Amino acid sequence: MTIIANFIFMAIAIGISVAILPGVEVGVWSALGAAVVLGIVSTFIRPILLFLTLPINVLTLGLFTWVVNALLILLVAAIVPGFRVKGFGWALIFSIVLTIIIGILKAIF
């Protein structure tokens, strides 16, 4: 899939997730910015973090990946103005919902 399609799916998924979850707030332009920054962070920082946390990830049978994703979402919320997450729990739920919505969008299109 192209980079543009992934960006569009990410932006749509962020918009839908924000509408569902009361602990996450974002404006229209901030959603686009968050999609770009989250894409960049997921491409460059996430693989490094997953490699560094590989032992604990193996011990938890991959569940620690959700913790890494939540931390990355908190990082993006700190970088992008107008994108706010009300704590780690909401970031964890947001990452799960975001993954599900992106999977559905990729299955449809």
Image: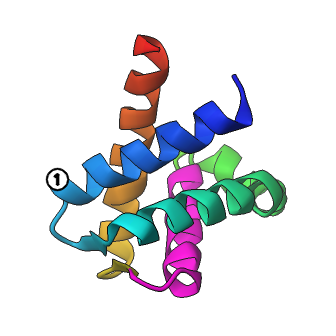
Q: Nearer the viewer, residue 56 or 85?
A: 85
In the drawing, does residue 36 fall left or right of residue 47? left
Identity of the residue drawn at 59% across and 51% down: 65
* Span colored in magenta: 64-82
Identity of the residue drawn at 78% across and 64% down: 45
Q: Is 66 included in the stretch rendered in magenta? A: yes
Q: Is 17 included in the stretch rendered in magenta? A: no
Q: Is residue 13 above or below residue 22?
A: above
Q: Is residue 60 above or below residue 82?
A: above
| Figure quadrant of residue 44 | bottom right
Amino acid type indicated by mark 1: Ile
Identity of the residue drawn at 52% across and 40% down: 8
Determine whether the residue tagged by mark 1 lies in a helix, strand or loop.
Answer: helix
> In x, y percent, where is residue 33?
54, 67
Number of numbered tags placed on the structure image = 1
> In x, y percent, where is residue 3?
72, 37
Residue 62: in sight, yes or no? no
> In x, y percent, where is residue 4?
66, 37
In the drawing, does residue 38 fall left or right of residue 23? right
Q: Nearer the viewer, residue 17 or 58?
A: 17
Identity of the residue drawn at 44% across and 71% down: 30
Mark 1, residue position: 20
Residue at far front of view: 29
Question: In this figure, which colouring scheme has been used for the structure?
Answer: rainbow
Residue 53: in sight, yes or no? yes
> In x, y percent, where is residue 55?
76, 54
The quarter in which the N terminus is drawn is: top right
Q: Is residue 101 above or below residue 42?
A: above
Secondary structure mostly seen in magenta is helix
Q: Nearer the viewer, residue 19 or 8?
A: 8
In the drawing, does residue 70 fall left or right of residue 82? right
Badge 1 density bin: few <14, some 14–19, many ≥20, Cα 10 Å: few
